[in-house]
Amino acid sequence: MVQEGIRKGPWTEHEDVQLVFYVKLFGDRRWDFVAKVSGLKRTGKSCRLRWVNYLHPGLKHGKMTPNEERLVIELQSKWGNRWSRIARKLPGRTDNEIKNYWRTHMRKQAQDRKRAVSPTPSTSNSSSFESNDPPVDSMPFMETKDRSFYDTGGLEMLAPRGKNTKQEEEGIEKGYSLDDIWKEIPLFEIDTTKGYSEEGCNFSSQTMASPIWNYFPDMLSMMDEEESSVFVPTVTGQIFAGYEQL
DNA sequence: AAACACGTCAACCGCATTTCC
DNA sequence: CGGAAATGCGGTTGACGTGTT
C-alpha cells in the first residue's frame, strides 16, 4: 500500500471532522480501510493515532489531577514504561499523554536532584510512592475494565459514561480550545432539518470531550449497523461536497 | 521589547504483536 | 502452519507557547 501523496504533520480541522465521521461509520478498528475510504491522505496508523490521542470522545484534555499524577508515578514504578497499560487505569488519558507527563516529571525530578544533591539520601528514589501508598488496585477511580478505554469498537462508547462530568469542568477551566475549533468547522452546512437536528443529542459536553459529536447525534445511533455503506455516499456527499475522493 | 531557555504536546518512526488468509 | 498485512506500543523529535532574563 504505497500511497502517494501521504500527508504528514499536524491535522487540520477538516481532516479531524472527516476522520471522526468515518470512524463513526466503520468503527475504530479498520484503520487502513478508514484511511482509504475517507479520502484522507493519511496512513491508517496516523488516523489511529489521531483518533486515540485527540479525537476520541471521553478524552480529558486538561491538566492531570494530583490523583492522576500520583497514580501514574505509582503505576510506573510498578509496571515500568507500560504506558498503554497505565493509561487503562486512567480513564480519559492516553498513553501518549502519560508518557509525556512522565518525561516531564522525570526531567523535573532529575533537575531537582541535581540541584539538591541531597544530603539526606533517604529514599529520594525515583518513586517516592513505592511504599506508602495504598495498593493501586484499591483506588477509587480505577474502575476501568482492562480493556483500553479508547477501544470504542463501534458503539459502546456511545453509552453515557457518566463519570467524566467533573473532569469536564476541569477541562473547561483550562481553556479547552477544542470547543472553539469545532464550532468553526464548516460542517454546519449539514442540513440539520434533514434529520440531524440537535434535539435528541444526548451527548453534549457531559460525556463527549469532543464537540464534534454534536454534529452527528443521530448518526451515532446508526453506528451499530456497520454496513451503513449505503449511508456513506449520501451523507458524505452532503457533508463533504467537494471532497469526495472515494 | 527582544532573545533565550524551558516545558508541553502532537505526531512520526521502528519494532513487536496480533489477525487474517 | 506460515507469511503478509494490520494494528498496537514505546521511544523520540520538532513545533509551538510561555516564562525569564
Image: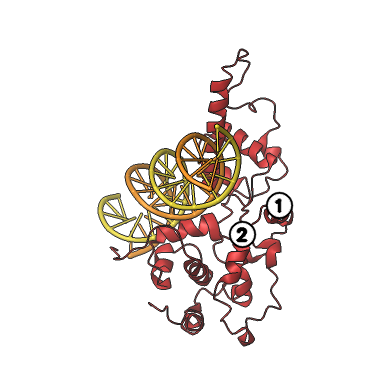
Chain colours: A red, B orange, C yellow
CB under 8 Å between discs 1 and 2: no
Residue A199 place in picture, x, y as percent: 71, 78
Q: Earlier in the sequence, mark 1 or mark 2?
A: 1
**Residue at the image point whose x is 71% and y is 62% from the top:** A206
Mark 1 surroundings within 10 Å by alpha-carbon count, few (fewer than 14), some (14 through 19), many (20 or more): some
Furthest residue to the top?
A: A119
Q: Which residue is mark 2?
A: A177
Q: Amino acid at mark 2?
A: Ser
**Residue at the image point whose x is 44% and y is 61% from the top:** A47
Q: Is residue A192 in sight in this rendering? A: yes
Most foreground residue, A3 or A61: A61
Q: Same chain for marks 1 and 2?
A: yes
In the picture shown, does residue A175 fall above or below C9? below
Most foreground residue, A158 or C4: A158
Q: Which residue is mark 1?
A: A170
Residue A170 place in picture, x, y as percent: 71, 52
Q: Secondary structure at mark 1?
A: helix
Mark 2 surroundings within 10 Å by alpha-carbon count, few (fewer than 14), some (14 through 19), many (20 or more): few
Q: Is residue A160 in sight in this rendering? A: no
